[in-house]
Every structure is written in structure tokens, then in C-alpha cells.
Amino acid sequence: MVRLKPEEKNIRKIQKQANGSMTVTLPADFIRELKWKGGLKVTVKKRGEGLLVEVWKKPVATKK
């Protein structure tokens, strides 16, 4: 495996899956710092020229 320079550490490539979806891997140290685990549901929102990734919050049921 190639050792990356610190300034290149967070450069990621968008990969196309067979079903047409796109994936991006996140740096493991970011995930550890946020204390996220595998299987965690997240939401992705477009913000300007970038993306915002947040932990998904289950909607609260409202009474009618």
C-alpha cells in the first residue's frame, strides 16, 4: 500500500457501482472521532458546492 503525504490523506475518489449508485469512502479517523459505527444511518444533504452528512434522526410520530 502506498503511504500518502499528510496533505493527500483526505483526497477520495468517487466510485461508480454496478447498479449506478456512487460511493465515497470516508477517512477512518473521522469516523472514530465522531464515534460512528458500521450500519449507522446517515442523511446526505447538498449544501452549496458540497455535502453535509449527519446522523439520521427518526421522525417523531404526531397525533392527529
Image (cartoon, rainbow, N blue to C red):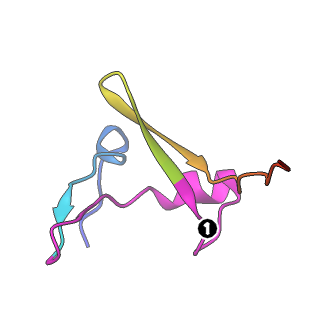
Taking 50 as reference, is 44 left or right? Answer: right
Taking 55 as reference, is 50 left or right? Answer: left
Q: Residue shown at 27%/51% (left/top)?
A: 12
> Based on the displayed image, in which of its 4 quarters is residue 8 positioned?
top left
Residue placed farthest to the front in the image? 64
Residue placed farthest to the right in the image? 63
Q: Main secondary structure of the magenta part?
A: loop
The front one of 27 and 39 is 39
> Based on the displayed image, in which of its 4 quarters is residue 27 positioned?
bottom left
Taking 17 as reference, is 36 left or right? Answer: right
Q: Is residue 5 magenta?
A: no
Q: Residue shown at 22%/65% (left/top)?
A: 21
Q: Whole-percent x and y of residue 46?
A: 38, 34
Q: Which range of residues does the magenta coloring cover?
A: 18-42
Residue 6 versus residue 2 in the image, above or below:
above
| Crowd class of label 1 (few under 14; some 14 to 19; many from 20; radius 10 Å) | few
Q: Whole-percent x and y of residue 38?
A: 58, 74
Q: Is residue 37 magenta?
A: yes
Q: Residue shown at 55%/51% (left/top)?
A: 30
Q: Pointer 1: what residue? A: 40
Quarter of the rendering occupied by the N terminus = bottom left
Q: Whole-percent x and y of residue 25?
A: 36, 61
Q: Residue shown at 71%/52% (left/top)?
A: 59
Q: Amino acid at mark 1?
A: Leu
Q: Whole-percent x and y of residue 13?
A: 21, 54
Residue 59 versus residue 19 in the image, above or below:
above
Taking 26 as reference, is 29 left or right? Answer: right
